[in-house]
Amino acid sequence: MVKNENAKLQTLAVLVDNESGVLSQVSRMFSRKGYNIESLVVGTTENPRVSRITIDVLADEQQINLLGNQLRKLLPVHSVKRLTPETSIQRELMLIKVHTMDGTQRNEVIQLANVFRAQIIDVSIETLTLAVIGDTDKISAIEKILKEFHVLEIARTGGIALERGKATIHDETKEKGEFNYGKNVL
């Protein structure tokens, strides 16, 4: 892993062809350069032939620029954009299953869910499962508090992000017009 005291968590949004092997190609590029991907989220976009990858990686300014340039060289990559907390909206999803011994504990977990605006998505005699959406700090805060109870299982998605306002990832394509994102695209 690349060690650097100036490194901080950086977010890259990448548009790629939605086909097999592309994710492997992108992740191998990070591995070859010696970087550990801290979070990786992939999903389709408004165009089913294009997927969006959101990658969090520890890097400094020079390193993140290098990684962005290396990604742009990959054939299936349409666009790469660095997203900063100031210019983007970033969210994460966590599902957390908590064992509740009795009604008192159950009520405490329900109250915590309300404070954090979490949804209770599953209830059994001895467990509550919550869904929490928010920034990483919010997710980590409720996770830490709920560990005071008996947490049975946690699943976190990693961050996803979009730019604020009118700006989009489509503003920085390899070549303007090279990829058609218009209404005629299936």
Image (spheres, rainbow, N blue to C red):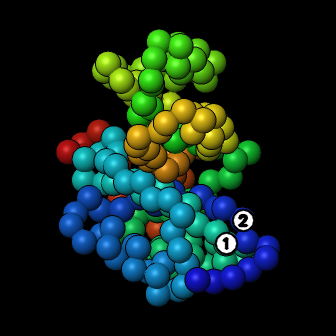
Q: Is residue 128 above or below residue 59?
A: above
Specify the label residue 159 is tagged with: none
**Place of residue 134 in the rendered image (x, y in percent of width and height, measured from the top left):** 58, 34
Rendered image quadrant of residue 53: bottom left
**Place of residue 172 in the rendered image (x, y in percent of width and height, measured from the top left):** 54, 59
Observer-nearest residue: 88 or 153?
153
**Residue drawn at point x = 48 percent, y = 73 percent:** 72
Q: In this view, does 79 lie above or below 166?
A: below
Looking at the figure, which quarter contains the N terminus?
bottom right
Q: In this view, does 82 lie above or below 112?
A: below
**Residue drawn at point x = 31 percent, y = 47 percent:** 44
**Residue drawn at point x = 42 percent, y = 20 percent:** 120
Q: What element carries label 2?
A: strand
**Discs 2, 1 touching: Cβ within 8 Å:** yes
Callout 1: 10 Å neighbours few (<14), some, many (20+)? many
Specify the label residue 59 is tagged with: 1
Residue identifier under label 2: 8
Q: Of the residues shown, which amino acid type is indicated by label 2?
A: Lys
**Place of residue 168 in the rendered image (x, y in percent of width and height, measured from the top left):** 54, 46
**Residue drawn at point x = 48 percent, y = 78 percent:** 30
**Place of residue 12 in the rendered image (x, y in percent of width and height, measured from the top left):** 55, 60
Looking at the figure, which quarter contains the C terminus?
top left
Q: Is residue 179 above or below residue 48?
A: below
Q: Of the residues shown, which amino acid type is indicated by label 1?
A: Ala
Instruction: Using the numbered discs, state the Cα–Cα distance from disc 2 to disc 1 in whole angstroms.
Output: 6 Å
| Precedes in sequence: disc 2 or disc 1 | 2
Q: What element carries label 1?
A: strand
